[in-house]
Image (cartoon, rainbow, N blue to C red):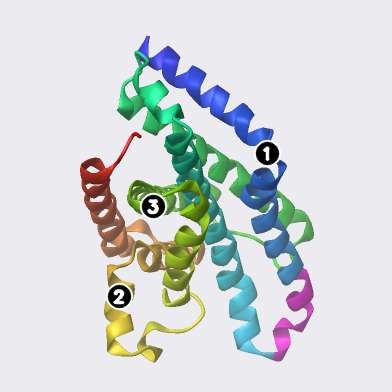
């Protein structure tokens, strides 16, 4: 009964998501467009500077992947806020489905859409990207799903604390994108002031970027144990915090 309810709720949420064109574009279209347009425009000039080569080969694919994770988190925050404000969460809680099943269905849908978008990115990259993509798709998908799960847990904390649905996306953006700016993706961590380095090391975004960069570059998982541990620790902490402060109505 619980499993059937889980799949039915996931299917309903998928149909709701597909009916929202802007959400569909932001989740699937934007990361793919960024990846291809920047890659095609910068790719021909890669030989002019090692920095451009590194950007196209590593930074851009990881950035596109982080956009997928951020889109999933922002969408989750918005949906939870809208459902709470509209009384939908309260009605769902009154159904035979447990709160854990309801929230897990939302997370599962976001992770599935992230994996689907990553698959499209690889397929499009094989055809239109200026360099050969030789990354292990399965390994990178697992890394991205782990990173997305950890960031989604942070999203649950934000969704639990944000006052109304109107503030959901602005608050999410105000928190997530600055964390990406100091994650080491674009600027080395040692270029920041010590206080920002400390903030970066406490952020799941920094460890997600490091993990994705390593796996994309072909490093084994044994070299990523610190990042994996940090992401799992963030997930555990954020889950505990959101369980304490989450409001169904």
In the rendered image, which quarter is residue 31 located in?
bottom right
- Name the foreground residue: 20 vs 113: 20
Measure how far apart labels 1 and 2 are at the Cα level: 35 Å
- Name the foreground residue: 187 vs 220: 187
Q: Which residues are magenta?
A: 40-48
**Left or right, 178 with reference to 48:** left
Q: Residues within 10 Å of mark 3 (few under 14, many from 20)?
A: some
Measure how far apart labels 3 and 2 are at the Cα level: 21 Å
Q: Secondary structure at mark 3?
A: loop
Q: Is residue 145 above or below residue 199?
A: above
Picture residue at 74% right of the left edge, 77% below the top: 42
Tally of numbered discs: 3
Which secondary structure dominates the residues rendered in magenta? helix
Picture residue at 38% right of the left edge, 60% below the top: 220
- Residue under numbered circle 3: 162
Quarter that holds the C terminus: top left
The image shows residue 163 at horizontal and vertical percentages of 39, 51
Picture residue at 74% right of the left edge, 75% below the top: 43
Residue 43 lies in magenta, yes or no?
A: yes
Mark toward the viewer: 1 or 2: 1
- Residue under numbered circle 2: 199
Measure how far apart labels 1 and 3 are at the Cα level: 22 Å
- Residue under numbered circle 1: 20
Q: Which mark is residue 55?
A: none
The image shows residue 101 at horizontal and vertical percentages of 35, 25
Picture residue at 61% right of the left edge, 87% below the top: 50
Q: Residues within 10 Å of mark 1 (few under 14, many from 20)?
A: few
Sequence-wise, the earlier of marks 1 and 2 is 1
């Amino acid at each position: 009964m619980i499993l059937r309810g889980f799949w039915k709720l996931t299917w309903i949420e998928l149909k709701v998501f597909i009916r929202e064109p802007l959400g569909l574009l932001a989740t699937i279209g934007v990361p793919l467009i960024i990846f291809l347009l920047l890659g095609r425009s910068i790719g021909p000039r890669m030989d002019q500077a090692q920095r451009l080569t590194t950007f196209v080969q590593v930074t851009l694919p990881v950035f596109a992947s982080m956009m997928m994770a951020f889109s999933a988190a922002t969408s989750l925050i918005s949906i939870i806020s809208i459902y709470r404000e509209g009384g939908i969460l309260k009605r769902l809680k009154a159904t035979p489905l447990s709160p854990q099943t309801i929230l897990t269905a939302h997370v599962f849908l976001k992770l599935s859409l992230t994996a689907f978008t990553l698959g499209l990115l690889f397929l499009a990259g094989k055809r239109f990207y200026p360099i050969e993509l030789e990354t292990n798709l399965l390994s990178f998908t697992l890394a991205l799903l782990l990173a997305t799960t950890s960031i989604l847990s942070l999203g649950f904390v934000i969704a639990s604390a944000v006052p109304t649905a109107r503030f959901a996306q602005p608050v999410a953006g105000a928190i997530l994108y600055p964390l990406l700016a100091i994650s080491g993706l674009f600027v080395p961590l040692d270029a920041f002031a010590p206080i920002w380095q400390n903030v970066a090391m406490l952020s799941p975004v920094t460890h997600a970027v490091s993990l994705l960069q390593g796996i994309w570059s072909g490093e084994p998982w044994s070299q990523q144990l610190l990042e994996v541990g940090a992401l799992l620790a963030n997930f555990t902490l954020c889950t505990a915090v959101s369980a304490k402060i989450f409001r169904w109505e």
